[in-house]
Image (spheres, rainbow, N blue to C red):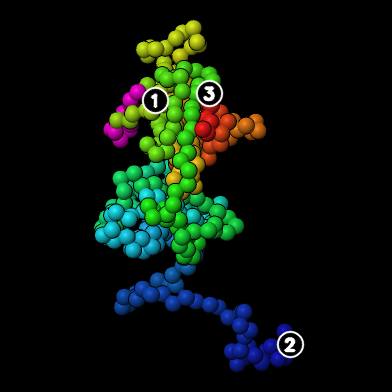
Amino acid sequence: MSLIEKVKNLFGFTPAEQQPTTVASNVPAEAGQPNPGPLKAVPAGPPPAALLREQVMRFIIGKLRAYQNEPDTAPVGLRLAVLCTDTEDEDLYRVVLWANQPGKFQAELARQLADHYITLPKNWQFEFAFFMDQLPDTTYREGNLGLVVVDRAKPESATLRARVVALVGQMEQAEYILDSTQQTTFCIGRGHTTQTASGRVRTNDIVILNDDDPGFDPQKGAGNGAVSRAHATIRFDMIQKRYALLVDPGGLPSGGNKTKIIHPNDTIERADISGMSYPLQSGDQIELGGEVMLLFELL
């Protein structure tokens, strides 16, 4: 130790990096009791999902205040765009938006909108999408959130109609015509109806036949037992003007079934994420349970 350092130590002068640092405790010690010591620092991180969910709700509600007490001009569709910094950020927002419970966030949003006197049409749609680079063009933007609002005042593009036919397997009808002006959601499953886990009775719009159903022809092949009674849904996205496939609980690997999309360029897309929309293009083949193959075509 040099002479200068000895003098500094003698008078209590030590380098800043060598001085012990303490964090004062905000818990007072009782009389006669030793101080419990400094509190441990809590690592910084993203806010809890519940808090972040409330922030998203406030953002959407705030942007829709112009529609208070105006049900005749209320939006028919909302699309939330979320800019994420990485995959962990996206996973957090999937929890925030209840991605594994389709319809739950939309139902809660509708309830909170009604509390603010904002009433949306019966069949209004809500979609969300994640982006890593930058937000797309949106009606409103705030921070890492963007919101596209589709209302009746905006001109609509040409109506999209599509057709679904069975390449392998048997459907109740030779073909099903999807008309977005009549409805926007088309449920696919084995049989006409089934009861969901919540107790709701689900009605299938595209009916896959089993070998014990009326109209089943054994000469055309075996039954379609690998297709769930609540397998998948084709939904028309009024915001992006396209059809997309969503996998229902019965069509997920956890339910013992699988769902795939074979695109015209022969690429195969596994549809195995609950609540995720898989865009459909004309010529796509939808494989259900490894046994049934449906052809999707735009008209």
Q: Nearer the viewer, residue 267 or 36?
A: 267
Q: Residue 40 at x, y = what percent?
A: 46, 67
**Mark 3 or 1, nearer chain start:** 1
- Mark 1 sits on what residue? 229
Q: Which residues are magenta?
A: 192-200
Q: Nearer the viewer, residue 248 or 29?
A: 248
Q: Residue 278 at x, y = what percent?
A: 52, 39
Q: Residue 267 at x, y = what percent?
A: 64, 33
Residue type at mark 2: give it: Ser
Q: Per the image, is 293 magenta?
A: no
Left or right: residue 10 versus residue 241 is: right
- Mark 2 sits on what residue? 2
Residue 86 to residue 122: above or below: below
Q: Nearer the viewer, residue 294 or 75?
A: 75
Q: Nearer the viewer, residue 42 or 19?
A: 42
Q: Are marks 1 and 2 in contact (CB under 8 Å)?
A: no
**Mark 3 or 2, nearer chain start:** 2
From the image, give the main secondary structure of the stretch colored magenta: loop
**Mark 1 or 2, nearer chain start:** 2
Residue type at mark 1: give it: Arg
Residue 169 to residue 264: above or below: above
Mark drawn on residue 33: none
Q: Are marks 3 and 1 in contact (CB under 8 Å)?
A: no
Displayed quadrant of residue 206? top left
Residue 27 to residue 2: above or below: above
Residue 281 to residue 147: above or below: above
- Mark 3 sits on what residue? 293
Left or right: residue 157 versus residue 8 is: left
